[in-house]
Image (tube, rainbow, N blue to C red):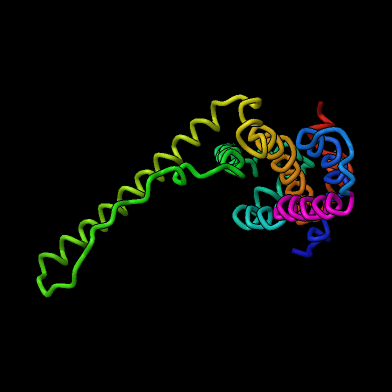
Amino acid sequence: SSVGGADEINFNEILLRKYIETVVPPLTTPGDDEQHGSTALCDIVALQALSRRVHYGKFVAESKYQSDPVGYQKLVDANDSEGVMKLLTNDAVEQQVIRRARLKAATYGREPLLASMAPPTTTATTTHSNNSNSNNNNKDEKSDTTSIVAAAAASAVVVAIEAMGNSSEEYKKQGKVDPGVIESVYRDLIIPLTKDVEVAYLFRRCGKEPPPEFAPDRMIRDVLE
């Protein structure tokens, strides 16, 4: 909504600083690979994706406001930013997002476990008018498909267990990215900054400027620490 300039909320300043300070270091190694142009392009793509993800918080905040306009208006009128933050927080959903991010990172750049499986056996068929032969062939095909789906599901379970239990050092050897780092990016940057955007949006949506601690050059968690 454009009410009170709520749609103009922009936290790219703190996002850029956090990207440089907390995202890049654990994902890179010290040194100069002299690929400055490619690196700059990758940084731009990553920052655009992060900014888009964080500022989706404005749409989420509008949806939450529409579901309880009286509740949010009352908290904003009382300058209760802590109450607004508490009302918009859904811990269960946040934990689901964090777990999903870790699992996706665990499979990124890894050889699918199904690639090492032997191809399914096929039954040589000859065209017959006999319906029983056709039915048998269909059963063989369904059996092969079921086996592949079952193997894929089992592979996914294995990856999930590994992702939640393996150490960072083990994953550095197995995959392209440490799932723990991606998990921390979501837990310590994306989710809290998105919620800061939501609080700032809701204050403007309700006709007041957000408190100073929700200025676009800081994160509330840093102010409180």
- Image-quadrant location for residue 34: top right
Secondary structure character of the magenta stretch overall: helix
Q: Residue drawn at (62%, 52%), measured in percent from left and top?
A: 68
Whether residue 206 can be seen here: no
* Residue 12 placement (x, y as % from top left): 85, 50
Q: Is residue 52 magenta?
A: yes
* Residue 87 placement (x, y as % from top left): 64, 42
Nearest the viewer among 68 and 171 is 171
Q: Quadrant of the N terminus?
A: bottom right
- Image-quadrant location for residue 15: top right
* Residue lying at the far bottom of the rendered structure: 129
Task: Identify whether 164 is placed above or below 68.
Answer: above
On the rendered structure, is 109 left or right of 202? Answer: left
Q: Residue drawn at (29%, 52%), measured in percent from left and top?
A: 121
- Image-quadrant location for residue 10: bottom right
* Residue 4 placement (x, y as % from top left): 82, 60
Q: Quadrant of the C terminus?
A: top right
Q: Which residues are magenta?
A: 36-56
Task: Identify whether 32 is placed above or below 123.
Answer: above
* Residue 56 placement (x, y as % from top left): 70, 55
Nearest the viewer among 158 and 141 is 141
Whether residue 219 can be seen here: yes
Task: Give the number of marks.
Answer: 0
Q: Residue drawn at (89%, 39%), measured in percent from left and top?
A: 32
